[in-house]
Amino acid sequence: MTHFHFSLRHHDAGTAARRGEFSTPHGTVQTPGFMPVGTQGTVKGVTIDQVAASGAEMILGNTYHLALRPGHQTVRRLGGLHGMTGWKGPILTDSGGFQVFSLEAIREINEEAATFRSHIDGAIIRLTPEHSIEIQESLGSDVAMVLDHVVALPAERHEVIDAMERSIRWARRCLDAATREDQARFAIVQGGLDVELRQQCASELSSMDFEGFAIGGLSVGEPPPEMYRITEATCPYLPAEKPRYLMGVGTPVDLLESVARGVDLFDCVMPTRNGRNAMAFTDQGKIKIRNAVHREDIRPLEASCPCLACRHSRGYLRHLFVAKEMLGPILLSIHNLTYYQRLMAGVREAIEQDLLGEFIASKKAGWASSPSSS
Amino acid sequence: MTHFHFSLRHHDAGTAARRGEFSTPHGTVQTPGFMPVGTQGTVKGVTIDQVAASGAEMILGNTYHLALRPGHQTVRRLGGLHGMTGWKGPILTDSGGFQVFSLEAIREINEEAATFRSHIDGAIIRLTPEHSIEIQESLGSDVAMVLDHVVALPAERHEVIDAMERSIRWARRCLDAATREDQARFAIVQGGLDVELRQQCASELSSMDFEGFAIGGLSVGEPPPEMYRITEATCPYLPAEKPRYLMGVGTPVDLLESVARGVDLFDCVMPTRNGRNAMAFTDQGKIKIRNAVHREDIRPLEASCPCLACRHSRGYLRHLFVAKEMLGPILLSIHNLTYYQRLMAGVREAIEQDLLGEFIASKKAGWASSPSSS
């Protein structure tokens, strides 16, 4: 596939971190990189210009949500995800597998398909690997994810094995069903918290012709050290020359720990969701901006931050939330998106200088200093 | 007051419309002009950059709301309305008189003060003309409005007279209480729908040292022709060399009809409120973007509009509202704010060319054509 290329520019001397570039038909993404989530065709609360201004280079769309509303054929007629949203950079779409898992309206998963109820109108939906690819081809994303079978943890080992093996078979069906030359396919490694299963799954998927590899089924409630352990054990079993994507992760510290274990791409709703809920990420820890201590604080969230929110005082941001003004969630979403991108820019620079370990230690120290004002 | 200057550049040949410039400590406003409303220190749903990008030159803040939350002393400590919101242009604040009227928690209005309950916590608030000015001086607006006594219409004539005469006495008290050289005071003409009372009130206020004059107590439910009649009868009784501001008005056609009768400034929540409610203003009439007819419509709201919303299809805008995404209200607010500013820019150009009558006729014809798609 000449439309896609992943080049590794540098390996951190002290960790498994990689500094790379992932080229797609809609531009190049510097890795390690973070993708804001645009579930329903919009990163919640912000304009596409503000997403770009945050430094984001690639965003994510949710196949399940978009297939239900407005419908993938409608998205296609409105110009595909790129034309509809106005986002000019690369877009990755998930497969719907995670939503089948997370929305509690599952009816049945068998070898052929996942069958479940729409959370919008209760209609019964049957999603096959082939259908997931067809939808994603209509959406026109640069990267399509394979349909996978995610199980809730903890689970019986035979269930985990069953889901992992099905995920491999479905991955192959997705590859076989794909028709678009300008869309890459990423496989998804499953296997629960079992290192042996994860490595087996990674090895089998690595033998197939995917442009990238994801680690799925994590960040579903397990303790972070478990997630790090599985990530660390899995990455070496994935092709070194392809991008690695840890799905749905995570907190700032999760990102750093996972980069150090060899992950290149991330996505998470946390920057926008927490922003809407009045929580701002900073290098000095989290700030709950509704707290009364911020009432007449003239300082910005972070003096060094170039975002729109940081042109304002904490006192003003607090007022906006207390007064239930939309601008509060808008500005904190912008700040958090910018925070994540600046964090990843710092990560990339640290890798280039073989200083990722020091960078991580420094960030952790700042976060642990959590100001009394938060 | 050397900080303020109103210069009339041209009078329309066929109407009473004027083309002017109002200079303030924070810049010059081209008139006729429209002020977006920032009730609680934010124009709802949009960033201050987006307000500026819409073409707005002056915005309005609400004294009553800001005095309650976050409190005018807090606003002052956060840099005044300008410093707090980041708006660099002129700001006008109302006096609280209209909220005393419109919020149904009035306890009493006597010669000394209006006493009422906070809509937030039920606390009893006593607002005098002097206190209204003190609050507005803390807010630091460029233009402060006098505290007036607004009555619901229809009302007994003696009630209208009583409120009108009190408004004149309160206007004088506001002038006497004012201390800031860098803040202009605008008087407010009352008198209900009685031309004789309106003209008497305008004449008496005109003898006082105000930098501008407002027509208040309209747009409170009376038929538009009544509002036009009162505006037309009142303007000639106001000083020709001072700006005239019709408070709380209005629809696009209200603006045109009132400009033609000699009004220079307007404010209204309609662009943002209607935008949040999925209604877009266009030269072809209103568009209710939630309607199913827009589902796969690839056209923008208006092909000629340069706003952010008009970079997107109607189908996408509809999807955002149907999916309850914040970006829908954000984008339609931006569009409507831009629509109002473009309308006023057209008004100003038409006046300069002595073509306001033709401009109004052309706009009305477009609006009457209301597309079937709305």
Image: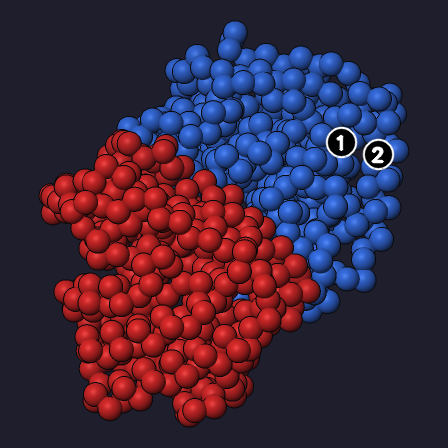
Chain colours: A blue, B red
Which residue appears at 38% of the width and 27% of the height?
Answer: A83
Q: Which residue is mark 2?
A: A359
Vertical side of A46 occupied by A190: above or below = above
Which residue appears at 51% of the width and 24% of the height?
Answer: A89
**Residue A331's spot in the image, x, y percent?**
57, 49
Q: Chain of mark 1?
A: A
Q: CA distance from mark 1 to mark 2?
A: 8 Å
Task: Determine whether the residue tagged by mark 2 lies in a helix, strand or loop.
Answer: helix
Left or right of A224 on screen, residue B228: left
For residue B322, the mark is none
Q: Can residue A15 be spotted in the picture? A: yes
Q: Look at the numbered discs 1 and 2 and tell me whether their residues touch, using CB distance below 8 Å.
A: yes
Vertical side of A90 occupied by A217: above or below = below
Amino acid bearing label 1: Gly
Closer to the camera in the image, A330 or B66: B66
**Residue A81's spot in the image, x, y percent?**
40, 30
Left or right of B138 on screen, residue B7: left
Task: Place residue A177 in its image quadrant.
Answer: top left
Task: Place residue B105 in its image quadrant.
Answer: bottom left
Amino acid bearing label 2: Phe
Q: Which residue is mark 1?
A: A346
Q: Chain of mark 2?
A: A
Which residue appears at 50% of the width and 34% of the height?
Answer: A49
Left or right of B102 on screen, residue A152: right
Left or right of A298 on screen, residue B50: left
**Residue A266's spot in the image, x, y percent?**
63, 33
Task: Place residue B97 in its image quadrant.
Answer: bottom left
Closer to the camera in the image, A311 or B136: B136
For this orientation, the residue located farthest to the top is A2
Which residue appears at 76% of the width and 30% of the height?
Answer: A347
